[in-house]
Amino acid sequence: MAFIKINKENFFHNLSQFTKKTGSKNSIAIVLKDNAYGHGLELMAKLSAEFGLTQAVVRTYSEAEKIKKYFKQILILGDKALEDDSCSFALNSLEDIKKAQIGSMVELKVDTGMHRNGISIDEIEEALKLIEEKELMLVGLMTHNRSADELSSELFWQQKNFEKAVGSVTPNKNIRTHSFNSATSLRLPCENEDLIRLGIGAYGYSELPTIYDTLKLKPVLSLWAKKVSTRELKKGERVGYGGQFTAPKNMTVSTYDLGYGDGWMRSNSFEQPFVTAEGLPLLGRVSMDYVILESTKDEVCIFNDALSAGKALGTISYELMTQLHADIKRVVI
Ligand SMILES: *Cc1c(COP(=O)(O)O)cnc(C)c1O
């Protein structure tokens, strides 16, 4: 089957870069949601702990349970709050507060302009009252930025709104406050942040316009496929479903064991063929389990840079990587 190589040195390099910005490993929470952006949840948890990180962020409690042993504290973004010494839960709405189990550790998410999740600034007082009534343990106040990776001042407008929220909550509460994702951490100084929630940057990418490229990041994941069979094509013979690719000359092609069933995108095999990291265009349509290349190599690298590969496929690095199925074997190099 196709397989994924995880470059540990590059991962540690990226984490070191961000550690220089925060000044401490303890103020970095590695975001491991969605199978660690396709890299493998447990594997990346283990490597993060080996590097010295003590905090993580996931979406669900069941993800947290799989990686608890590696971290001191895990923030869960989208699940019902439960009592657990090592997990805190983001409260995305007043409803979430009502559903939370007594005694759970919670972090109040405020909506500072993204309008996706979080309670509005006007509701903070009500939320704090409810939290107290429900006997929840408030440990944090957080928000999320909608445009940190775009060339605009929106980030600063949201930061101002967050400061307002922080100003109205923290004077009488000893809690942490956090709002930085990767793009924000690349744009702004981090040394005064209680915590940054580091996702895509740790995996080696910045979707920021290049003028912002403040840190040199290195891709961690590469996708590889193995040869299944080789054949000779005569000029004019056509290959794959629909016979979409016609051999312009006699050529030797091989089938490799990667397809849309593994989470590799089929979508634009129609107009422009995707070109692999080694410069080979995919010939014809992507099948469920196979692609065809003009190569006889036993193993080929499909991509090692999700940013450029994502662009070629009309998407972003995040989507390309999170789609890669969890049962593809991950090997650390
Ligand atoms: C996914 C996520 C992050 C990480 O974002 P990156 O852009 O990958 O760094 C941070 N905070 C929240 C709330 C998220 O959902």
Image (cartoon, grey):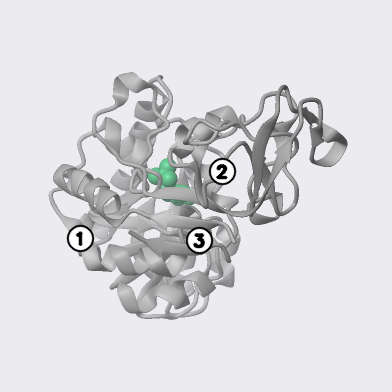
The response on whether ligand 1 sits within 8 Å of label 1 is no
Instruction: Give the crowd class for mark 1: few <14, some 14-19, many >=20 residues within 10 Å.
Output: some
Q: Is residue 333 above or below residue 293?
A: below
Q: Which residue position is annotated with label 2?
A: 320
Q: Quadrant of the N terminus?
A: bottom right
Q: Which residue position is annotated with label 3?
A: 35
Count the labels in the image. Answer: 3
Q: Locate residue 272, reporting x and y percent.
A: 67, 24
Q: Looking at the image, which residue is at 57% across and 40% down?
A: 295
- The residue lying toward the viewer, choosing from 197 and 307, is 307
Residue 280 occupies quadrant: top right
Mark 3 to mark 1: distance in Å?
22 Å
Q: Looking at the image, which residue is at 54% across and 61% down?
A: 78
Marks 2 and 3: which is nearer the front? Answer: 2
Dot 3: element:
helix
Mark 1 to mark 2: distance in Å?
29 Å
Q: Locate residue 133, reporting x and y percent.
A: 47, 72
What kind of residue is marked 2?
A: Leu
User: In this image, 4 relative to 256: left or right?
Assistant: left
The response on whether ligand 1 sits within 8 Å of label 2 is no
Q: Which residue position is annotated with label 1?
A: 26
Q: Locate residue 172, reporting x and y percent.
A: 25, 58
Q: Residue furthest right?
A: 242
What kind of residue is marked 1?
A: Asn
Q: Looking at the image, which residue is at 45% across and 72% down?
A: 64
Dot 1: element:
helix
First of labels 1, 2 by sequence position = 1
Q: Looking at the image, which residue is at 72% across and 42% down?
A: 286
Marks 1 and 2: which is nearer the front? Answer: 2
- Can you see residue 125? no
User: In this image, 130 relative to 155: left or right?
Assistant: right
Instruction: Tell me whether circle 2 and circle 3 mark residues in contact (CB < 8 Å).
Output: no
